[in-house]
Image: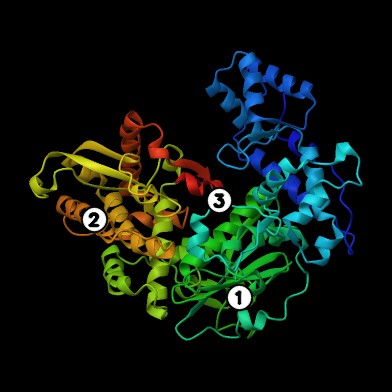
């Protein structure tokens, strides 16, 4: 049958060379489809006969695309029920035989059968001289002209109904993103569905300027601001077969698109700072990052009162992208040498973080520089490595957060550090339980149904009300459903022994949700009823008191979060209990509601599952 190598063969579509003789865009598009295919584990060459029959029937149609309903009708005609038919479509998508995004509101009703037809549509944009002259900025009205050019033959034109779909597919393939409208604030944009107008403007990543912008000195000062700490890591890109330096051609085009939510121009595109070999970013807590190609490597520098969170996220993003998108390449995370430097040029020598951590575990305190052979202190080098930083205790972080909770609009060094730590704690919480997210959501709050009669110290078995949360907005479902307490809210009988066994995860979960709730509510400017908001806070606090009474004194986040940042650290007994907690809960919830209150399972850019409210599904 069809192997994964078939995918790229669909995409031999020529693109006009640029002024340097390079053909941009189509190679990146080929790699994007190949990446989708590679995400599926190897399967045997044989497939069910019904699968082969439906594939042949679709080929016989000769159509470049079909409505989903028509594909399902063909499947039914070959004795597939709807569940098997959708499985066939999902597997075929991941193998590259067709293209279908079931969770995307714009794309879910169309199945693309001929990727070459799709790639040709993309090439019209990449070859457009006007778009090149605008350094990749293009309005939807111009895209519509390119896709339905009256000067081309009818079979090379695309009807207007397909244009929004093509725009969304370019975003899916990391070819483009929609430029921010300064008139729309961040909170309103998060809650407003995607709207396309003739003036909707996108940036085509492959067509950004190749010259470093002049305003970079304003965006990235020569030294950190007062209170900021600077950390640097290098993503050393090598050929996995021989360890030699190698090029990931087109990497920064994709990084510009993938990381656009951190762009300096996310509220006004004119403030963006990016070019073909670099970009400057800023997160919501005013931490700044400078990513630049140095030779074949990517140098990432972050300035922040707490740089570990942003630096770790960016490093993981680059590493994932290189190793999953460019076959045969590996990304080794390195930190630069420091003083004293034998050549008086600190930053020249690179140390692999994994090797430094391995040496430290063996009680070695120094490591020789590969350039000047000067022995350097491992702890000093690892201060640039988020994977090696000491975790703050949950109790300490909660205490610090309480002091600033009512002043979230005030931006200072202390608040930026604390909010960055809260954000990293939340990210680590999800990262640790990535595998469990395949089967169900990870975020929930809980409280006894009869709180007045509940004694946290003497209870044995009680009925609890469990509320699911959206992993994108970080808010409970009743808030996102305008107070509807029927969707994503369940009554379950739980016993004290289950709480004891599950305590490490439940402690971190309730503590983290208690901190992200006011931040998330403030960020999206939700008009939460004060009484409802206080009720959620009280429920979280009550859940915390139940856990504390079950386990006694508080635990440290680092006791069961270490594995989130480093694959070399063991998860430990507590972490294994966390997975068991979720598996048991998923089984109970599926028995009551297989749809998990309407939460939609989506996949982010790193192929990780998230469970989000349906209004946010289109952002993945």
Q: Quadrant of residue 513?
A: bottom left
Q: Which mark is residue 215?
A: none
Q: CA distance from mark 1 to mark 2?
A: 61 Å
Residue 593 visible in the shown view: yes
Q: Quadrant of residue 61?
A: top right
CB within 8 Å, label 1 to label 3 = no
Residue 362 visible in the shown view: no
* Residue position for label 2: 535
Query: Which label's residue is closer to the chain start, 1 or 3?
Result: 1
In this rendered view, identify the residue nearer to me: 192 or 420: 192
Which numbered disc, 1 or 3, marks the residue closer to the eye?
Answer: 3
Which numbered disc, 3 or 2, marks the residue closer to the eye?
Answer: 2
CB within 8 Å, label 1 to label 2 = no
* Residue position for label 1: 373
* Image coordinates for residue 444, horizontal then vertical, percent: 32, 47
Which numbered disc, 1 or 2, marks the residue closer to the eye?
Answer: 2
At label 3, counting other C-alpha atoms closer than 10 Å, the crowd grade (few under 14, some 14-19, many 20 or more) is: some
Looking at the rendered structure, the secondary structure element under dot 3 is helix
User: Where the N terminus falls, by quadrant?
Assistant: top right
Q: Residue at x 46, y 71 (%)?
A: 285
Q: CA distance from mark 3 to mark 2?
A: 30 Å
The correct choice, above or below, for 444 with respect to 390 in the image is above
* Residue position for label 3: 619
């Amino acid at each position: 049958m069809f192997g994964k190598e078939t995918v790229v063969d669909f995409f031999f579509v020529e693109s006009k060379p640029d002024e340097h003789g390079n053909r941009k865009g189509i190679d990146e598009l080929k790699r994007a489809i190949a990446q989708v295919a590679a995400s599926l584990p190897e399967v045997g060459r044989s497939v069910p006969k019904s699968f082969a029959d439906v594939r042949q029937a679709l080929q016989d149609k000769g159509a470049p695309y079909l409505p989903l309903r028509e594909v399902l009708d063909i499947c039914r005609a070959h004795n597939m029920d709807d569940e098997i038919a959708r499985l066939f479509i999902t597997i075929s998508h991941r193998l590259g035989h067709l293209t279908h995004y079931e969770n995307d509101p714009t794309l879910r009703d169309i199945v693309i059968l001929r990727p070459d037809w799709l790639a040709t549509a993309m090439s019209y944009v990449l070859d457009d001289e006007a778009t090149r002259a605008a350094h990749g900025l293009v309005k939807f009205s111009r895209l519509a002209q390119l896709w339905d050019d009256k000067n081309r033959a009818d079979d090379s034109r695309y009807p207007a109904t397909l244009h929004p779909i093509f725009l969304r597919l370019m975003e899916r393939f990391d070819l483009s993103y929609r430029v921010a409208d300064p008139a729309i604030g961040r909170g309103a944009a998060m809650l407003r569905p995607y709207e396309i107008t003739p003036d909707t403007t996108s940036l085509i990543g492959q067509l950004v300027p190749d010259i470093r912008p002049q305003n970079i000195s304003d965006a990235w000062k020569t030294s950190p601001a007062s209170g900021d700490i600077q950390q640097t890591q290098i993503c050393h890109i090598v050929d996995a077969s021989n360890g030699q330096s190698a090029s990931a051609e087109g990497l920064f085009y994709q990084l510009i698109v993938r990381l656009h939510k951190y762009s300096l121009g996310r509220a006004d595109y004119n403030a963006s700072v990016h070019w073909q070999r670099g970009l400057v970013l800023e997160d919501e807590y005013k931490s700044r990052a400078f990513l630049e190609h140095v030779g074949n490597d990517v140098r990432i520098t972050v300035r922040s009162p707490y740089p570990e969170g942003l630096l770790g996220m960016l490093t993981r993003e680059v590493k994932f992208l290189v190793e999953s998108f460019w076959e045969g390449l590996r990304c080794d995370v390195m930190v630069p040498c420091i003083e004293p430097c034998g050549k008086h040029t600190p930053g020249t020598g690179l140390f692999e973080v994994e090797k430094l951590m391995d040496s430290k575990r063996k009680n070695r305190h120094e490591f020789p520089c590969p350039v000047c052979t000067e022995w350097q202190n491992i702890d000093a080098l690892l201060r640039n490595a988020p994977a090696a930083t000491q975790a703050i205790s949950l109790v300490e972080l909660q205490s610090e957060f309480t002091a600033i909770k009512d002043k979230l609009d005030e931006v200072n060094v202390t608040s930026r550090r604390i909010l960055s730590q809260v954000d990293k704690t939340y990210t680590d919480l999800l990262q640790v339980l990535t595998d469990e997210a395949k089967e169900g959501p990870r975020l929930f709050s809980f409280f006894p149904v009869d709180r007045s009669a509940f004694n946290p110290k003497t209870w044995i078995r009680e009925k609890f009300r469990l509320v699911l949360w959206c992993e994108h907005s970080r808010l409970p479902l009743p808030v996102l459903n305008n107070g509807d307490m029927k969707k994503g809210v369940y009554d379950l009988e739980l016993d004290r022994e289950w709480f004891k066994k599950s305590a490490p995860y439940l402690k971190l979960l309730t503590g983290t949700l208690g901190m992200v709730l006011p931040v998330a509510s403030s960020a999206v400017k939700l008009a939460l009823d004060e009484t409802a908001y206080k009720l959620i806070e009280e429920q979280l606090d009550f859940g915390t008191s139940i856990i504390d009474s079950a386990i006694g004194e508080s635990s440290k986040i680092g006791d069961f979060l270490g594995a989130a940042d480093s694959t070399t650290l063991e998860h430990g007994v507590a972490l294994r209990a966390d997975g068991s907690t979720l598996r048991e809960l998923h089984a109970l919830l599926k028995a009551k509601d297989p749809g998990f209150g309407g939460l939609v399972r989506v996949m982010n850019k790193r192929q990780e599952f998230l469970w989000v409210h349906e209004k946010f599904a289109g952002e993945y």
